[in-house]
Image: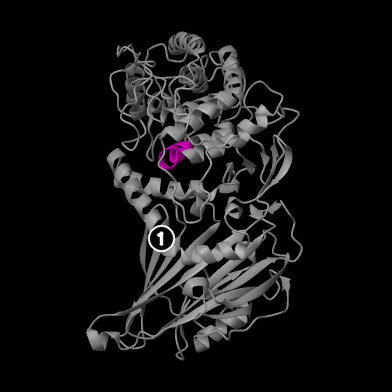
Amino acid sequence: MAAVPESGLVYPLLGRPHDSLSTQVTFPTYEGSNYDASTTNLTYSIQGRVKDEKARVILSFISPITPTSAFRQSMPASYIKIYVEGNFDLSIYVDINGQWISGDDESRIQWEFSPPQGQDLGSPPLKTWKIRRSEEEQLKEKNDRAEWGTLYFTGPAEANHESGSAFNMRNRFKNTGALRNATDGNFRNINQDEPVFAFSKDFKLKGGLSKSKELSRDSILFTIAHIQDPVVQFAAARGLTLMRPLWASWFETADLMISHHYLDFEKSSKLAGEYSEQLAVDALKSGSEDYKDIVDLSARQVMGATSFSGTSENPLIFLKEISSNGDFQTVDVIFPAFPFFLYTNPRWLAHLLEPLLEHQLSGQYPNKYSMHDIGTFPIGKGYADGNDEYMPLEECGNMLIMGLALVDSLGGTSNPLGPLGSLSDHADVASGGVFPLNSRIDSIDSAWGGTRDKKQVQSWLKKSYRLWKQWTGYLVEEALIPVNQLSTDDFAGWLANQTNLALKGINGIRAMSGLSEALGENKDAAYYREVSEDYIEKWQDYGFSKDGTHAKISYTWYGSWTTIYNLFADSLLCFHLPDTTSSPIGSSQSDTQKPIGHDRKGKSRTAFIDEKIYKMQSDWYHNVKQKYGLPLDSRHLYTKSD
C-alpha cells in the first residue's frame, strides 16, 4: 500500500490489503507492466491532495536467472525493489502473512524479528522477519505448499517494522503512514486475527519539482526467501537420503546466505539482465515479439519448479510437477523443459538428469525401460515394485534424445568427444562428480564446451552406457508397433499404435546411434542407425492416411489426424539437415558441429525423416486449425503448450 502521511489517503497497490480497512480507499492508476526472463515491473501513478502533486510507484519483482553463476542460482530467494518518484511525501507499506509457509490456514505459526546487525566491511545493516510453523511437518505439502521451512523477509535497517493483526496494522498505516517498530508476541493460527509481518518506508519527495523541475526519486529493496533443509528425500545409490540445499556448500548458516543475497543485488541483477538481453535477441531471431514474451515467461516458470541440491562437487537439480499430481523428476515434464536448460546452461541439464540415472544405475528400479518419475514431491523413494505411471516408450525416447542433445551441445554429434582417452590428461575432472561447480563464493562458472566439459560428458556417458543400451533395447523391441500405453498426453488416455509416440521411440533409437558413436562404440552405432532407418521407413507407411495428406492418431484409426510434435527431436539433433554444418543450439556453440547425416568423409545421405513429411503436416495443420489455433488431434478441440 501507499499512503500520504497524516492525510488519511491510502492507495492499495498489489493484492487486496484494503479488505482490512474500515473506510473507503482511493485507487491508484495502473499504468501497466513490463517483464523479461527475471523481472516483472508493475507501475502505478498516484495523484496527491492537490492538482500539481503527482507520484509514480514501480513494484519490481526480481527472480534472477544467472546461467553463469550456479552459486547464485542455488539461493531460494528473490528480490522486491520498490521505486518511487514524485513531488510529495509518500509512505510505502509491504507485508506478508503465514500462507507463505503452509497450505492450511489452521496451522499455528511463530515468528521472530532479527534486529539490525553490523555488516562486515561497512555494509549496511539489515533487519529480518523469520516465520515458520510452530510444529513443522518435514517433507510434507498441503495444497502445493511446503509445511516445513522458514520464511525470511529482509529489509534495510532504516525501514520501519511491525508484526500484528492485519486489520489493526493496515488501518494504523492508513491513518499515520508509519509502523511502530514493534513485535507481536502472541503466536497463533494463520487465520486467527491474521498475523502479518511488515516493513514500511517514508519517502521524502516534497520539493523536488519546485527546486529542479524534476521529480525526486528513491527506492527500497527487500529479499524474500523460503529456507528448507532438507529440500527433498531421494533414494540415491547410497540409500534414502535427506538432501541438503546446494547453497549450504558455500554458507554455514541461512542468515549468512540471506545477507549475501541482499547485498549482491547489483551484481546478480546485472548477470540476470545480460541473460535476459541475449534471450530476447535470440528469441526475436526465431520468432515474433509474442514469441519472445512467451520465452521470457517460460524461463521463469521452469526455474520456479526447481530445487538446487547436493554439493558443489556433485550438484543435483530436482524438478517438481506443478498443478498436477506433484511427481518430481518426471521424465516427460523435464523433456519439454530441457530446451531451456540446453540453451541456458547444459550443465544444469546434466544435474537434472543425474538423479534418474543414479537411482536406476543402483538397481532400485526393476523394469528394463526408463522410469517415469522418482516419487511424489518431496519424497523421492522411487518404485522398487516398478509400479510407476506406465509410459515406457515415451520416457525411453525422452532420455535418449536428451542425452544426445547434451553431447551435441559440445560441438557436434559426429564423435564430438573424440575416442576414449584422447582428451588432455590434465583436464580437471572430479572423481565421481557430475559437472562440479566452482567452490569459491562469488564465482562465475566457466563457459560450457571446453576440454574439461568434454571429459566430464565422456565420463558421464561411459558410466551410464549400459542403461542407455538397456533402454534402446526396449525401444528396438517395442517402438515400431507400440502396445496400449500412455504417452506424455496422458490426459487423452491409453491407446495402442500411436503414430506420434512411435516416432518418439524411433528417434530415441537414432539418438542412441549418436551416443554410441560419441564413445567410439562403432558397432553399436551402426546397428542402432540401421534399425532406426528401417523403422522410420515402415513408420511412414503405417502412420499416414491412404491419400498421403496427414498423419493418423493411431496406425489403425482411419479418418483421424494428429500433430506430430515429436518431429522436434529430428530437427534439434540435425537428423534431417544433411547439407548444413550449423549448430542446432545457437551461435554460442562450436561451429564445427556436423549433423548426424554426415559421414566422416563429408558425404551426405538422404534425411532421416523425409522433408515431404514436414511439408505434408504443415499443409494439413492449416486445413484443421481452429479460431484460436491448432488442436492437439482430431479427438478434441484442446491443445497443449509444451
Relative to residue 570, is residue 281 depicted above or below? below
Residue ID at (35%, 14%):
600
- Residue 602 is situated, as x and y percent measured from the top left of the image, at 30, 14
Colouring convention used in this rendered image of the protein? one colour
Foreground of the two, 350 or 87? 350
Residue 193 in which image quadrant: bottom right
Residue ID at (29%, 85%):
208
* Name of the residue lying farthest toward the bottom: 6
- Residue 243 is situated, as x and y percent measured from the top left of the image, at 67, 47
- Residue 60 is situated, as x and y percent measured from the top left of the image, at 42, 65
**Is 345 in the magenta?**
yes
For label 1, the crowd category at 10 Å Cα-Cα, with few meaning under 14, some 14 to 19 and many 20 or more, is few
Does residue 54 appear to the left or right of 634 in the view shown? left
Give the extent of the magenta segment.
337-346
- Residue 189 is situated, as x and y percent measured from the top left of the image, at 72, 70
Relative to residue 344, is residue 580 depicted above or below? above
Q: Amino acid at mark 1?
A: Lys
**Is 472 in the magenta?**
no
* Name of the residue lying farthest toward the front: 426
Residue labelled with disc 1 = 267
Give the secondary structure at mark 1: helix
Residue ID at (46%, 12%):
529
Does residue 508 appear to the left or right of 295 in the view shown? right
Relative to residue 178, is residue 330 depicted above or below? above
Instruction: Inspect this view and state whether residue 638 appears.
Output: no
Label count reads 1
Foreground of the two, 608 or 226? 226
Instruction: Inspect this view and state whether residue 402 appears.
Output: yes
The secondary structure making up most of the magenta span is helix
Relative to residue 496, is residue 456 depicted above or below? below
